[in-house]
Structure formats: structure tokens, C-alpha cells
Amino acid sequence: MRNILLLLTTLLFSTTLFSQIFEPITWKSSVKEESENVYILSFAATLEKGWHIYSQKEVDTDDIAPTATEFTFYNEDKTYELIGDTNEPEGIQKFDKVFEMDIKYFEDSVVFTQKIKRIDQSLKTIKAEVFFGVCDDEKCLAPDIVEFNLNLSGGNSNETEKPDVSESSSDTKNKTTVSSENESNDKEKDSQKGLWSTFILAFLSGFAALLTPCVFPMIPMTVSFFTKQSKTRATGIKNAIFYGIFIIVIYVGLGSVVTAIFGADALNALSTNVWFNLLFFALLIVFGLSFLGAFEIMLPNSWANKVDRQADKGGMIGIFFMALALAIVSFSCTGPIVGTLLVQAASQGGMAPIIGMLGFSLAIALPFALFAMFPGWLNSLPKSGGWLNTVKVVLGFLELAFAFKFLSNADLVLQLGLLQREVFLAIWIAVFGTLALYLLGKIKLPHDSPMENISVGRLSMALLTLAFTIYLIPGLWGAPLKLISGFPPPQTYSESPRGFGGSSSSLSSSELPEGAKYGEHDIISFTDYEKGLDYAKKMNKPVLIDFTGYACVNCRKMEEYVWSVPSVLKTLKNDVVLISLYVDYKKELPESEQYVSKTTGKKIKTVGNKWSDFQITRYKANAQPYYVLVDHNEENLNKPVGYTPNENEYLGWLKKGIDNFSVK
């Protein structure tokens, strides 16, 4: 009896543990009569926090792309006509690195509307359906279909019902709620990390700007002015502190103006637009050439003269205009850096431009306040000289390298193939290689001072730059280059996607097992479950079931960043048989193989439907990615896992399942 109770407890625990049925979206439909025989059909989707649904018009492809929302209106008898397309709001637009394209999606809630005109007066009900997919930051659900019956007499509001897909539905709902809260918290943490990264990057950029010929010499001049012109030391310190505060106010004000003009979401949309990426590319090229000494970018002298006259008035107003004069006079050095920061912050959107300007201005303002408090520190400052121009030139090279990231974004969206991975890396190798030669004194630029010898600091920087350049070179032959992941185009956008020299696989396509193909990183994978299981029995290896999707962002991230790790890749190639089941594969099943799911009650029409139902029925889960290790009797070797971005954790999970298979 005790053993039976233990077994029941274990089964109940396992069901609860593995149940991960997410139901983050509900649909409601309604009808509004606009005029005689003209109606507006509304379809409102409400999403849980952290989840999103994609636009109707993503891309014209059936391959790897986000699952576009599609509405179908059944009108076989031609009893009504559609007026225009199905409308949707603006939504959120951004460039997605995984799909290498601009995407548009909606969060929280969205309403789609379709205007129709009734032709047959006897028409009372319209049947429609929506095909859609939902994702959050860690997973996507299999595409789903919801049907609507809209009553033209009005007063109706049809709401979708969520089917009970688990024996322990209450446990599943509780788990989903907790999961959603955790994912929401994770998303907020990620957002905070992003702002902190922006602040730190901006602070370092401000420090770099401080070491340029336009700003650095101003420190002793300004501090001396405050200490000499003030009646007491305390007054001088106070004025210098306010001077620093006003510098922060001016730059933060600039960030606020940019955000207010464009809007937080609009900034993000602009930063992912093809034409704005091309504009940013051109701007950074101009900024870079300016830093290299080709010309100077300056604001009109009349602006500086007017501000100087205001600064002579004294008091707090005078100090404010002194800070404004610094911003204007130093613009030829700080302008390109500020512009670059605002461009980078725009890609994040929200408060990022303001946070960026806070970090930048804080790095510039702090020295003025600190040296005013402790004037003796001025003696420890290095003297102005040629090294200031060296800092400016180094920033110029960085601007040039960064510019090609924006050109790459535009090229990826347009799929022109002009800046594929090898070309991008070749440009970066040329830029950083030239920078290394410059730092070693082999190249001189217009404003450089004569150099008799190289300082230890300059030599160290040259060696680091040279090492980085050498690190980039293997990328031309397919090396992953994880240090700069996200900057160059992906491996798939390449003249030779499998690296120079062709495939690294030992088998030719003709020697592949029946039903197998080469997947990511040349891993032999099956898309047919039965054939994959038969092959695993033949090779005496455990089976790794990979529930995935063409439109699953984090499935691609796992494949790109985790599966590519040598230890993980070796395990996937040699120790398991991979079966990848795509839950969003739209190919229709033969009529004889279509059925109604006993679990969800839905019609299973496509191959994707079949694998999604298989995942829900057997594993009580409906999110992707989802990984299951099973033996030849299809019994779990360990607990299934979802999105696992830590390669050591994922490798440990693989090894544990393989070890359990070995002892059976």
C-alpha cells in the first residue's frame, strides 16, 4: 500500500512538474453597424504581460519568419463583400537580429477591424477565423486558429474559451500564473540591465570625450577661473559644482528633447528603419572622418559669442551660460560622440537617450567639480599635447567601424547581399589593422605631433588592437567570433555559410540516413519522429526531441549561441539522435491522417498541428523551444527543459540524460 501511495505521489508530482500549458491570449469579437448594410467587424486580442502577437504583414515567405496573423472570412455564397483590408494599429517595430528583418508586433492588447458590406439581406451571421502565433522573450507557442461567428444583428461579443488540456488543470493554471510573473520580472530586470549598460557605455564615452583636445585643456582654465574670481574658496567650490550640474542639465535636456520629439517607441522604430540606418551610417562616417582630421564640425561662431556675452553677467545665470559655452565650443569633439550615443540609445528606446546623456555629462562634469574642491590635484594632470589628438583619432577609427553596423542592418533588411559577413569582417580587419599601425607610429595623420618614441600605454593599446585584429581573421573562414556577437551579419548571411572549404561533415548528402538532413552546424537531424526513433535504435543512442518552430526566436538563439559551443556541438553530433519537430510547419496532412485532438478538441490539419498536439498530449507543454531526452521505449531520461541560454547548464542536462541511458 505504501509503495502504491508513493507511486501515485510521484506520478502526480511529475504531471505537475512537467505541465507547462501556456494560454496567454484571449480573443473577443463584436459587430458595429456603421451605416445601412455596412458593418465593422472587430477582433480584440488581450495578451498577458510579456507576450506579443505579430502583425498581419510580416514577410512573403513560408520559411523562417515570424508567424504573421492571418484573418480568413468564409463567403462561399458571396452574400457580402470585404471593404479594404483588415486594419491593425501601428504596433511596435524593430529589426530582429535572429530573423534578420524588420518585424512588427503587438503587446498587451490589439484590435483588428474589417469593414464589410452586406449584399444578401437574409445574411445574419458571418463566419471567420484567425491564424496567429504568440511569443514572449523566452519561448513561442505553436500557431493556433480561433473561429468566430459574428451576428450582424449586434449586441454580441464572442469570447474564445480556453480548453482544459491537462488532468491537473488547477495546477497548470497556478504554474502558468507563477511563470508569467517570473517572466515579467525577468523582462523588467533585462530592461534595467539594458539601461545600466547604456549608462556605463555613455559614462565611458564621456570620459573619452573628456580626453580630447576640445575639452581637456578647459579643466585647469575653468577651475582656475572659479577659484580666482570667487571671494572665498567655499564660493569657488559651490560655483564649480553648479557649473558641473548645469553641464548635466544641458546634456540630459538634449536627451529629453530627442525623446519628446520622436517619442520613446518612435525612436526604436526609427533606429530599425532602412533609411534611418543609412542616415546613421552616413553621419558616423562624417563623424569618423572629422575625428581623423579631414575637417572640423563646428557650430556657428555667433552662437558661442552670444553665449559668452550672457556668461559675463555673473551669478547662476552666468554659470549656466558658461556651461552652455563649453558644450558649444567643444562640439567639434563631443558632437560626434553625443550623436553616436543618441543613435545607439535610440535602438533601445524608452528612457535610454536620457540615461545615456546623464552618463555622458556626468563623466564630463565630475572632473570640474572635483578639481575645484581639490585644486592641488591639477598638478597631477598630464600636460596637454599630442596624446590628446591620439585619443581623438582612436575615437575616429571606432566611429568608422561602428558605422558599418548600421549599413549592415540596412543591407540585411533589403537582402541585397552587399555587406555579407566576410565583407563586413574584412572592413573591420582593415579598420582595426590600420588603427594598430597608427598607434605603432607607422601612419601619421594631419594634426599629429612629431613622435620620437612610443609610450608604454600607447604600445599596450597597439598590441591589444593588433590582437583583436588577428582574432577577427578566422571569422573569414567561419569562426563564430563570440566576442563581437551581434555586430557582424550572422553566419547564414555569408558568401560561404558553411565556412570556406565547404561542409565540415563527414557524410555526403547521399550517405545521410533515410529521412535525415543536415541541420544547424551540420548536425544530422530528423523531422520524422518514427524514422528518427528507428535510427536511434539502430545506432543505440538516446533520442533528443527538439520541439521547435521556424518562427521561434529563442529556438534560433539556442541553436546559434548554445549549440555552437564546441562541447555541446560534439555531444549533439556524436551522442544523441536529434529529432526536430516543427510545430508551425504549415504543410497539410493527407486527408486520411487529419483528426480531432482528444486533448484539445481541435482539428489537426497540418504537420505542425500534429507535432504540437503530440507535445501537449504527451508532455503537457505547448511552448518552444522544448527539449526532451528519451530512450528507445520513449520514456524520459531526465526532466525536459525549455529555453536554457547557459551552455554549461544545457550541457549538464544533456550529459545527465545520456548517462541515465547508459545505465539502463
Image (tube, rainbow, N blue to C red):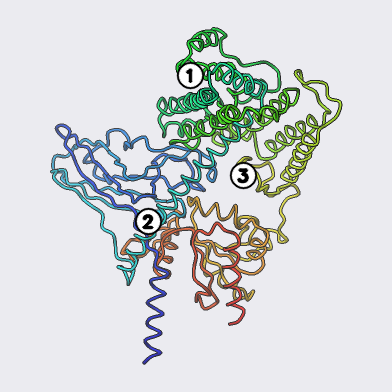
Quick one: label 2 or label 1, which is nearer the N terminus? 2
How many neighbours does mark 1 have within 10 angstroms: few (below 14), some (14-19), or many (20 or more)?
Answer: many
Q: Amino acid at mark 3?
A: Pro
Residue 144 horizontal/vertical position (percent): 37, 54
Q: Is residue 93 above or below residue 603?
A: above
Q: Does 438 sit left or right of 478 as displayed?
A: right
Mark 3 lies on a secondary structure that is loop
Tell which residue pokes out farthest to the front in this image: 232
Residue under label 1: 320
Of circles 2 and 1, which is in front? Answer: 1
**Label 2 – label 1 distance at C-alpha:** 46 Å
**Label 3 – label 2 distance at C-alpha:** 33 Å
Q: Name the residue at 53% across, 61% down.
A: 580
How many neighbours does mark 2 have within 10 angstroms: few (below 14), some (14-19), or many (20 or more)?
Answer: some
Cβ–Cβ under 8 Å for marks 2 and 1: no
Quadrant where the image shows the C terminus: bottom right
Residue 541 horizontal/vertical position (percent): 62, 73
Residue 315 horizontal/vertical position (percent): 46, 16
**Label 1 – label 3 distance at C-alpha:** 48 Å
Residue under label 2: 181
Q: Amino acid at mark 2?
A: Glu
Residue 212 horizontal/vertical position (percent): 66, 25
Q: Name the residue at 53% across, 29% down.
A: 361
Say the numbered circle drawn on residue 631. none
Q: Is residue 362 above or below residue 309?
A: below
Q: Is residue 48 above or below residue 367?
A: below
Quadrant of residue 613 in the image?
bottom left
Say the numbered circle drawn on residue 490. 3
Q: Amino acid at mark 1?
A: Phe
Q: Does 128 sit left or right of 51 as displayed?
A: left
Mark 1 lies on a secondary structure that is helix
